[in-house]
Amino acid sequence: MTTKADFNAEEWETLVAGPLMAAMQVVAAERGGTIRESLAVGRTYSEARQHHGASALLDAIVASPPSLDPSRLREGGGDVKGLARSRLAEAVALVESKATDEERHAYKQFVLTVAEAAAHANREGGFLGIGGKPVSANEQAALDEIRGALGQG
């Protein structure tokens, strides 16, 4: 069983930020709607806490609220999608190197669930939420890229 103690502080921050980075990648794929996406991501974390006990590592991750360091966003020249991709890749590499098969699966599934919640939070196109698509082509492309990064594509 992998625990928080198996990671140094920087690694833990990277691991905890992974799901949020995936959501940011989806949000950055399309303009507008960030409030709805933020609420959807928050609900996903809340629901994950209710399923406490399925994975000790995932329990510790969802109990550690992710935070964004604005200076890191500026370091990347404001390229949110690029930063999100690289940070998610780092998080996946960490979980691949230190976690058990079940923990890796649970982490990757949670990352994808968070990203999908962001993608489905706001209907794209249509008028006043009527019509439109649940996920835009750009958001779908971001989800496909995330699936690929998780080895699920």
Image: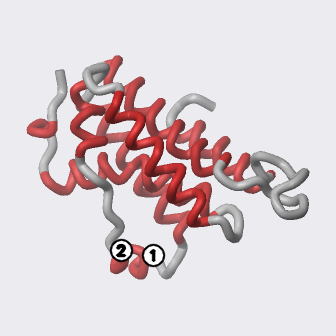
Secondary structure at numbered mark 1: loop
Give amino acid for label 2. Arg
Q: Residue at x 84, y 48 (%)?
A: 133
Whole-percent x and y of residue 33?
65, 65
Query: Which residue was labeled with disc 1?
Result: 76
From the viewer's perspective, is 67 left or right of 30?
A: left
Q: How many discs mark residues in the rendered view?
A: 2
Image vertical order of residue 116 relative to residue 13, above or below: above
Question: Given this view, does label 2 or label 1 mark the residue nearer the observer?
Answer: 2
Secondary structure at numbered mark 2: helix
Q: Residues within 10 Å of mark 1 (few under 14, many from 20)?
A: few
Q: Residue at x 80, y 52 (%)?
A: 137
Q: Residue at x 72, y 49 (%)?
A: 141
Whole-percent x and y of residue 151?
53, 31
Whole-percent x and y of residue 123?
77, 53
Q: Residues within 10 Å of mark 2 (few under 14, many from 20)?
A: few
Mark 2 to mark 1 CA distance (whole Å): 7 Å
Q: Residue at x 34, y 80 (%)?
A: 71
